[in-house]
Each structure stands twice: as C-alpha cells, then as structure tokens.
C-alpha cells in the first residue's frame, strides 16, 4: 500500500514537472514567433505608402499575434508562479529585480494585446482604429514593444546574476544588453541585429527553462 502510494506521488510529481517544462517551452517558442511576426509586419509597414492599407492586408497576421500573445502571457505567467520556489528563499536583491521586471513585462504584453486588437476588431465597445488615430495607435504599440525589449533584457541580465555557471551568466548579460540595444524604438528597424537578438534570447531562455525545471526536480519543490 505504501509502495503504491509512493509510486502515485512520484507519478504526480513527474507529471507536474512535465507540464511546467511544456508550458515553459511552448510559451518561449510562441513569444519568439510573435516577435518575428511583428518584425515582419514592421518591415512591411516601413516600406508602405498607406498605413491603413498595410494594416488591412496583414489583418490576419495581427489577429494571430494578438491571440498568441495572450496565450504566451498565460503560459509564461503560470510557469513563473510555479518556479518561484527555486529563488523564493534567495535573499539576493536580484531576485526582486527579476520578479519586478517580469511582472512589468506581463503588463506591457497586456497593453500590446489591447492596442493590437484595436487595429483589427472592436475591443470593449471601442471601434476599430482608422484614419488619423491609426498612426497614434501604432506609435503606442511600438512604444510598448520598446518597453518589452528593455524589460526582457533586464530580466535576462538579472536572472544571469543568479546563475553560478560562468558561461551562462556572462552570455546572459551580453544577450540582455544586445536585447535592449536592438529595439523597435527611436531609429529605423535593423532587422538582422534584431532577429539575431530574438534567436539568442530564445536559446538562452530555453536553456534556463530546462535548468530550472531540473532544479525543481532535484529539490522536490
């Protein structure tokens, strides 16, 4: 009876770790796809003569980005809550910075979802943005993406500070800085550096997601 109970507990624990890993990996890959999709839209918007026509042509892409960003927010938020125990007892000030930067990034994602949704369908009774308001809404979306890039860079840098492995610590700091430099804001978009930053950040986050789930398993949290 006791042996059966222990097997059931082990099965439940393994299932929990599997779900956390799956949520983490899916959330990261979705966010990578969202950023690449918006980069593509930005390049098309940059070469367009008429904003409204470009938005209309890419309405389906914007809808997909909007819905996937909501899914990524739910997955990443749920995972962050699940793995918080790994660093909850760590009194390092970086732990607080990691938490704050992640929460602010989630808030920025919600703002992007709301503003992007207004480009393609009515939201909470507000009409679809057209005419003179379109440029203002696009500016707000790009400002929010700029904020997300900075917060993601800070999040990676702060998380790197909590790592003991030198390679992932310093590579994380470098990737975080690159992430902050290659933003949508200010100067014109440079697609190649931004694409490289997206890929490197994704690889680093994937590696750390695997490591933190393994740490959860080892500590039986």
Image (cartoon, rainbow, N blue to C red):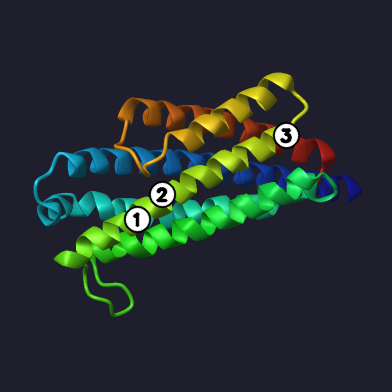
Of all residues, the one furthest to the right in this rendering is 2
Per the image, the residue denoted by label 2 is: 145
Per the image, the residue denoted by label 3 is: 161
User: Is residue 161 something one can see in this rendering?
Assistant: yes
Q: Is residue 214 positioned above or below 50 on the image? A: above
- Of residue 33 and residue 15, the one placed in the foreground of this image is 33
Marks 1 and 2, Cα distance to the nearest angstrom?
6 Å
- Of residue 190 and residue 60, the one placed in the foreground of this image is 190
Residue 10 located left or right of residue 175: right
Q: Give residue 127's quadrant in the image.
A: bottom left
* Residue at left offset 45%, top offset 61%: 110
* Residue at left offset 39%, top offset 58%: 112
| Residue 44 placement (x, y as % from top left) | 18, 40
Q: Of the numbered discs in the image, which one, if any, rests on residue 141? A: 1
User: Is residue 130 something one can see in this rendering?
Assistant: no
* Residue at left offset 61%, top offset 37%: 156
Disc 1 and disc 2 in contact, CB within 8 angstroms:
yes
Of all residues, the one furthest to the bottom in this rendering is 125
Q: Give residue 103's quadrant in the image.
A: bottom right
Q: Is residue 78 positioned above or below 11 on the image? A: below
Residue 150 located left or right of residue 79: left
């Amino acid at each position: 009876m006791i042996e059966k109970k222990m097997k059931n507990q082990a099965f439940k624990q393994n299932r929990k770790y599997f779900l956390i890993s799956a949520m983490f990996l899916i959330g990261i890959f979705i966010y990578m796809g969202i950023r690449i999709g918006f980069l593509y839209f930005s390049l098309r918007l940059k070469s367009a003569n008429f904003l409204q026509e470009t938005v209309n042509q890419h309405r389906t892409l914007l809808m997909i980005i909007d819905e996937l960003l909501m899914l990524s927010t739910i997955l990443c938020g749920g995972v962050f809550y699940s793995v918080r125990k790994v660093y909850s007892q760590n009194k390092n000030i970086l732990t607080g910075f990691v938490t704050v930067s992640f929460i602010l990034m989630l808030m920025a994602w919600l703002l992007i979802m709301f503003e992007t949704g207004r480009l393609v369908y009515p939201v909470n009774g507000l009409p679809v943005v057209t005419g003179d308001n379109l440029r203002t809404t696009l500016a707000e979306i790009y400002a929010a993406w700029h904020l997300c890039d900075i917060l993601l860079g800070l999040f990676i840098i702060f998380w790197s500070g909590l790592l003991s492995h030198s390679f992932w610590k310093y590579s994380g700091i470098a990737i975080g800085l690159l992430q902050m430099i290659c933003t949508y804001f200010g100067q014109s978009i440079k697609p190649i550096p931004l694409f490289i930053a997206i890929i490197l950040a994704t690889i680093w986050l994937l590696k750390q997601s695997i490591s933190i789930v393994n740490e959860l398993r080892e500590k039986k949290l």
